[in-house]
Image: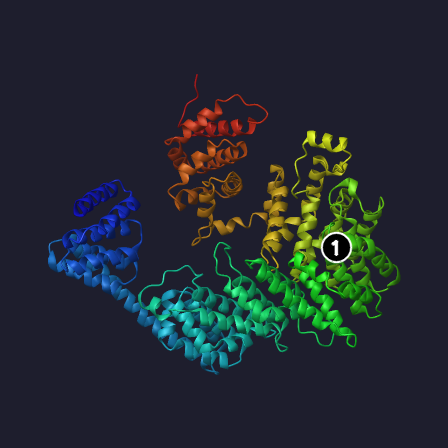
Amino acid sequence: MAEVDAVQLKEEGNRHFQLQDYKAATKSYSQALKLTKDKALLATLYRNRAACGLKMESYVQAASDASKAIDINSSDIKALYRRCQALEHLGKLDQAFKDVQRCATLEPWNQNFQETLRRLSTSIQEQLRVQFSTDSRVQKMFEILLDENSEAEKREKAVNNLIVLGREDAGAERIFQNNGVALLLQLLDTKRPELVLAAVRTLSGMCSGHRARATAVLHAVRVDRLCSLMAVENQELSLAVCNLLQAIIDSLSGEDKREHRGKEAALVLDTKKDLKLITGHLLDMLVGKKVSGQGRDQALNLLTKNVPRKDLAVHDNSRTIYVVDNGLRKILKVVGQVPDLPSCLPLTDNTRMLASILINKLYDDLRCDPERDHFRKICEEYITGKFDPQDMDKNVNAIQTVSGVLQGPFDLGNQLLGLKGVMEMMVALCGSEREQDQLVAVEALIHASTKLSRASFIITNGVSLLKEIYKTTKNEKIKIRTLVGLCKLGSAGGTDYGLRQFAEGSTEKLAKQCRKWLCNKSIDTQTRRWAVEGLAYLTLDADVKDDFVQDIPALQAMFELAKTSDKTILYSVATALVNCSNSYDVKEVIPELVQLAKFSKQHVPEEHPKDKKDFIDMRVKRLLKAGVISALTCMVKADSAILTSQTKELLARVFLALCDNPKDRGTIVAQGGGKVQERFLADGNDRLKLVVLLCGEDDDKVQNAAAGALAMLTTAHKKLCFKMTEVTSQWLEILQRLCLHDQLSVQHRGLVIAYNLLAADAELAKKLVESELLEILTVVGKQEPDEKTKEVVQTARECLIKCMDYGFIKPVA
């Protein structure tokens, strides 16, 4: 009975194959394989499934299935030829040649086999020629680089060639096979910056996407040596070593997403030990006194990117647990560093913020309360262990640590605020005569007052403290920080006009002072950053944001700060811009609930008159005039963990608000806002394919966003209209679905895309007219427009007019 079912499933698979439904055919053949032991039938099923694999470009599977058929019958000519085809696609030309040679022996009259033999023979000869020439080139390059007397121009050319060769898989393999790693180690030993940098970049290319080579390089160069290279002051070299370590980590953890086969898969069975070794060395770097600030930042970036789970659905968070147990105290030490104290480690402007972000990521990656309790206890023990009545520096470090945690997992930071002695120490430091003590205390107060519900103690006790410091201090650094604290408390009511914390006009005065400091270039960048932070809070007030956008020098000063190496300012700038453009989430006001709230004497949120659309549009125009786009494009390119998903969301909101008026889009592109489109035009990436496929998702919000992006891309570049039709065979079906969508905003975006494709080229337009899209456009275009549908109907009619211009359709008389 099972044999009969197997034959029926084979026939079913054949029918699916003829209909070009290769997935269904594969499924039928696979089910049949489980039901039969007949060797002839097994060979046929494996051979047929190999054919499906070739059609679906699953060449590894196709070669494997063909091999199983050949194992049963060594003269199975179809299986031999299919394996030949699969091996050729996998680049195994010598093995493919042997298979087709066997086919030609069995059927010498078959012209197809003879042609394949000739083609493969030519390809193998070319491959050997390139291989031998590459081998000699590699040797020549190393000779030039290791010869101290070689000309500078030749050495520079050899360096660039070596790096390029290392990025190509075939070139990387030739370097590896020609004792290249040992020779690259010799380059590292020269201690000459340009040669060390070249060696690191070449190694990075060799490790990318190749687990066996990455393992060999890691063991040959050693983690401690890589970390010592990353610890140097040279920013370019430090970043290059960081990229090399990331390439190694990606290859070892499988993040490179490439397929590992045969010997390579067998060479590296367990990479956990190597990954743990790298993690341990990175944690040691955090507290190393000889590590540069730049090196410490790179170590933090690598830990942030690679330790927490990327998908919380994955159960295993063992890497985070390892770091919590073995490195949390080290991370807390970085967070608690106070610049200008003698014991401070070398830092950059970004180091402490990066450490706060890492703490936040680790805390979010914990799966249960016991894990979070353990995390909290380590923090509590570390902070309370720092308190020392005889050593004020230790007390300052303790409060600085609390301040750093408050910038990470806020709830954990609040629990630490409740520790005995923390608040008392903050108050004591406010009254200290040392500048550094006051700075740390004021910053801690600022971070402690993030939420209105949590800031009651600070509002009650902190305002008087901050006002007193503001009045008495003559130090500009402290003055600005105390002002920010007051700004933060003054904006605790958010956008609600009826919940102002301070008297009428007070916030405007605070904002004016912030703008004054922001424009004062004689003040250091770190201090001016606090002025932006103050404005990030105060611009929730409509009067403040309206004044701010009229102060062009202040806006431009903020934009210039956003372009500096200090990336801690990104979130504050993004927040201020979101507030000025009113692109934050606004809860829908239901009139019935408002009346009910008034009746029961509950507070009803009030909208400021300057938060109405006319004022918002005017502010957007002023932001564009001040050059906001160049600042935004610079911010989104920041290669740092500080550019968090929250900051990216804020920047996206600002971009969307700026693009709301179609008349402003030309200005945005002119200022550099369209440069992101170049990434979609570039070959070798799936960005456009992803956007097109997202347009076919069932989630309306995702569809709306993706269709909007695709409409803008196809409007900006005609080439993207053609590329859209090539990235996926589903493009036309997806476009038709968009044009029929029941949500008007999605439908409008779909019709704009259709118009762009029609306008791009007559041949492309003809393809669309010959599909069902013409019928869709006709149905939509014939509708009587109302206030809601007028844009949709008008766009559909413009599409039909474009078709008439081409002469594809004629107007009805």
Residue 522, given in percent of the width and then of the height, sits at 78, 63
Residue receiving disc 1: 449
* Residue 279 visible, this orientation: yes
Q: Residue furthest top?
A: 813
Q: Nearer the viewer, residue 190 or 455?
A: 455
* Residue 160 visible, this orientation: no
Q: Is residue 590 above or below residue 223?
A: above
Q: Residue furthest right?
A: 472
Residue 83, given in percent of the width and then of the height, sits at 23, 57
Q: Nearer the viewer, residue 703 or 468?
A: 468
Looking at the rendered image, the quarter that the N terminus falls into is top left
**Drawn side of residue 479 relative to residue 647, left or right:** right
Q: Nearer the viewer, residue 440 or 33?
A: 33
Label 1 is placed on what type of residue?
Answer: Ser
Looking at the rendered image, the quarter that the C terminus falls into is top left
Question: Which residue is depicted at the point 72% across and 36% down?
Answer: 612
